[in-house]
Image (cartoon, coloured by chain):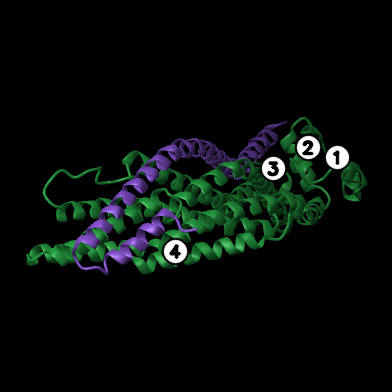
Chain colours: A green, B purple
Amino acid sequence: MMCCFVTNDAKRRCPHFRTQRRAPRTRSALRSTENDSFTLVRLLLYGRMHRHLLALLFLTVTACGLTTTQRAAVRNFSQATAALGEATSGQFVQMRDDVIRMNTARSELAAPGPHEGALDGPFAFKDVVVRTQAASALREYGELLQALVDDTQEKELQTASDNFVASVRGLPGTEKKLSDNQLNGIGQAVREVGSLVVEWKKKQAIEHIVPEADPQVAALCDLLAADLDPDGNRLATGYLNAASRLRTASDSSVKGSSNPTTRAAAAAAYQFAETSRARRDVLERASAAATKLKAANKALTTAIASNEVTSDDLKSYAATVQSLIETIKVLH
Amino acid sequence: MATLLQLIDALGDEIVKLPLGKARSQLVQQQGKLHDLLDELVQKNVQIDTPKYKAAIGKLDGANQALAAAHADVQQVAATIQKIAEVIGVLAEIAAAAP
């Protein structure tokens, strides 16, 4: 376990390790040499090993885990990704509902006869479900990334360390050789070792997974950006096309109908068409956020690999998503 | 260069300014054809993209599973220390019982 923190070469040079090798063995210690776990305890018990170990662990903590900057970069990216995933998923569902409403209203205002085309237009259920799943997968990616970075296991390590100390206290002769302060020191060392292992494992996972996921995140960002772009000739375009159709049809009905009920329905439909057309701004922002997510993911990958400071892309992306969320809140 | 949707919208802006009549009807008819063309293009693109989405989702799900596994791995650290504590406890009992 320690090999990730201290190299063999460092062990050879370190006077604390040399001192440790010369430490006298007691009868009970000799009895336990065949047991690795007991040997570890013995190492901690003799001399002032645990104090030196603590100092060494503090010195090596930055080499083993993510740096503060990297953690901030991951947290910034993952929070924004989770927020975008949720907002985007809601957009697709709402666009489909709106399109059905708009096409239904247009059908009701039209002259008697068959209605051409499906009421949900290009928002076929199977296609919308896939896009919602894509947004959910992105959101889950952000949430899992954040959970991994934020999980310090502090409480669990404290409990495990307390149990560890209680077990050591139970060893024969321990109470004569170790003061409470020394036992607390051992507990602290165990906790610190645990924290370092946690941080090291997190870094290993993130360094492996983030670059691996980069192409998939990029592909989904491209697809979502195109779908949400009002001029991308995909779903957002289909949505605004339906709104444009309804505006013309309802305007004709308002102008041509002498029946108050029909005119009222036409006026309501016109209002809904204009409200839907006003969503162009939200869609543009959502599309821009998806495009920036792609760049931010690439920047995150670079930051993880090179320990560089959080790039402007990440900051810009977070600001764009924040702006999108605020716009959506205003519209609801 | 304006997109097809922008042209349709611009045409719509002109239509709603006009009173009902022949000129308006002709514009509405032309706009209707453009609406149909755009819908057709959108439908086609949406259907082409759906398999691309599915492929990317499948691979991202793999990354999500790896993240969940890594999280579970991190949670094992405290459990491992706990097990070591248990081993020491057993050793203490054995040592105490030894002659």
The residue wearing badge 3 is A171
Image depth: mark 3 or mark 4 in front: 4
Distance from the alpha carbon under mark 2 to that under mark 1: 8 Å
Badge 1 crowding class, 10 Å Cα cut-off, few under 14, some 14 to 19, many 20 or more, is few
- Name the front one of labels 2 and 4: 4
What is the x, y in percent for residue A115?
19, 45
Q: Which residue is mark 4?
A: A325
Sequence-wise first label, 3 or 4: 3
Q: Is residue B63 left or right of residue A241?
A: right
Which residue lies under the disc numbered 1? A25
Quick check: do tags 3 and 1 share a chain? yes
Q: Nearer the viewer, mark 4 or mark 1?
A: 4
Residue A265 higher or lower than B65, as above or below: below
| Residue B53: mark | none
CB within 8 Å, label 2 to label 3: no
Q: CA distance from mark 2 to mark 4?
A: 65 Å
Q: Earlier in the sequence, mark 4 or mark 1?
A: 1
* Pointer 4 chain: A
Q: Could you say whether the residue bearing mark 1 is in a helix, strand or loop?
A: loop
Image quadrant occupied by the N terminus of chain A: top right
Instruction: Name which quarter of the figure residue B78 lies in.
Output: top right
Considering only vertical position in the picture, is A41 above or below A69?
Answer: above
Q: Which quarter of the picture shows residue A328?
A: bottom left
Q: Tell me where residue A126 appears, x and y as whole percent.
A: 34, 38
Which residue occupies the extreme front position in the image?
B22
